Image (cartoon, rainbow, N blue to C red):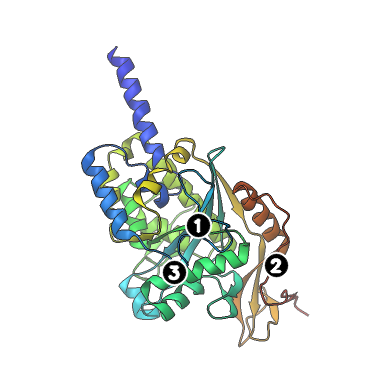
Amino acid sequence: MKQRKSSRQRRRQMQMGRMIAVVVLVLLLGGVGYGAYIVYKASSTVGDANQTLSRGGKSALRDSEVNPLKDHISVLIMGVDESEKRKEVQGEAVQADALLLATFNQDDKTVKLVSIPRDTYTYIPLTKKMDKINHAHSAGQAKNGKDGGPNVLIDAVEGLLHVPVDFFVKFNFAAFMEIVDEIGGIEVDVPTDITEQNSSDQEGAIRLKKGVQTLNGEEALAFARTRHMDSDAMRGQRQQLVVEAIIKKVASVGSVTKIEGLIDAMDGNFKTNLTFNELISFYKYGMSASIEKLQIAGQDAYINSKKEAIETNQKKRKGYTYYYLPDKKSLDETTRTLLKHLGKDEKYKHRYPQNNEVIKVMPEK
């Protein structure tokens, strides 16, 4: 009898773990369901983190406002570096270093997760020009204050993908590192030796060897952010792998006991327009944790102010800046997939880049 009870308890513990394990931070607080103190603490943390978008609750690409409790919805996950060291270099307006859009389908309880390369060349509505998509966040903060970043970044993502962004979760890298450390690190297969700076920008402070290993918070951040080993697109894929690794670790029996520590890690380190009750509704997705990872194919290129582009295997010329040029066909496919997942299976023709002609990359002569 005791053995059966113990087995049931283990199953309940595993279920509680999965409640908080779909998209790292979005489901982190959504799975907290035991103990009045923990619920109160989580509710207070989310309440303090609440930020209303200037557009209101409805995306311009929606006919009406959606409810996470009953509708298919999307959540934009933003990772920003708000460290004092970074602010000394960039000022108070900071860029988004990690950008992922997740869609949630109520019917089959599945999640689709697309990584948007931070250097994606796209139109920024606020500045009315083509730029790197991660600059949208800093542009919003520069013009409208600290809370202005998400508004402008959401506009840019909707312009790129033509998919409604209903909600957002923005976290800084201090929270990311604390979460990874709190769960005892994450297991990742590092594809090659990596030497990278740490979160304090100390060059060569992080050294990883090739192979499967457990990374602490600093190491996981370096692995997710480094661009020295591959492309901007591959960087996004590594961020998806890190998300998946955290999901698996948080869902384990041992890490359920650390929920209070995870809440402490989030306190003051994230912003969202989701309420506590809405976050709890993600429970049904956490139980299945079925995540399909999507990639936006494209090409690395150097582009100048005249929109002349050259391949990155050529020597960089004066006046040229690195960008990631998303492939139009891949954008079409990604958009259709996400719209269908949101129940908007309609005829669709992509318009990219908005207000600009398609850039043609010239090979070396």
Can you name the residue that lies furthest to the front here? 64
Q: Quadrant location of residue 15? A: top left
Q: Dividing the image into 4 quarters, which one contains the N terminus?
A: top left
Of 323 and 157, which appears nearest the observer? 157
What kind of residue is marked 3? Ser
Q: Amino acid at mark 2?
A: Arg
Where, quadrant-wise, is the C terminus in this rendering?
bottom right
Q: Which residue is mark 2?
A: 351
**Kind of element beneath mark 1:** loop
Q: Position of residue 130 (x, y in %)?
A: 61, 78
Disc 3 target residue: 54
Marks 3,2: beta carbons within 8 A: no
> What is the C-alpha distance between the residues marked 1 and 3?
13 Å
Per the image, the residue denoted by label 1 is 166
Reply above or below: 18 against 340.
above
Please report the residue visible at 28 percent of the width from the left and 57 percent of the height from the top.
267
Label whose residue precedes the other's in the sequence (3 or 2): 3
First in sequence: mark 2 vs mark 1? 1
Nearest the eye: 116 or 27: 27
User: Can see residue 302?
Assistant: yes
**Secondary structure under badge 3?**
loop
**For mark 2, does the 10 Å Cα neighbourhood hold few (<14), some (14 to 19), or many (20 or more) residues?**
some
Q: Position of residue 75 (x, y in %)?
A: 49, 55
- Disc 1 packing (10 Å; few <14; some 14–19; many ≥20): many
| Separation of residues labelled 2 and 1 (CA atoms) | 21 Å
Residue, far top: 1
Estimate the x, y position of residue 240 in percent, counting from the top left: 51, 52
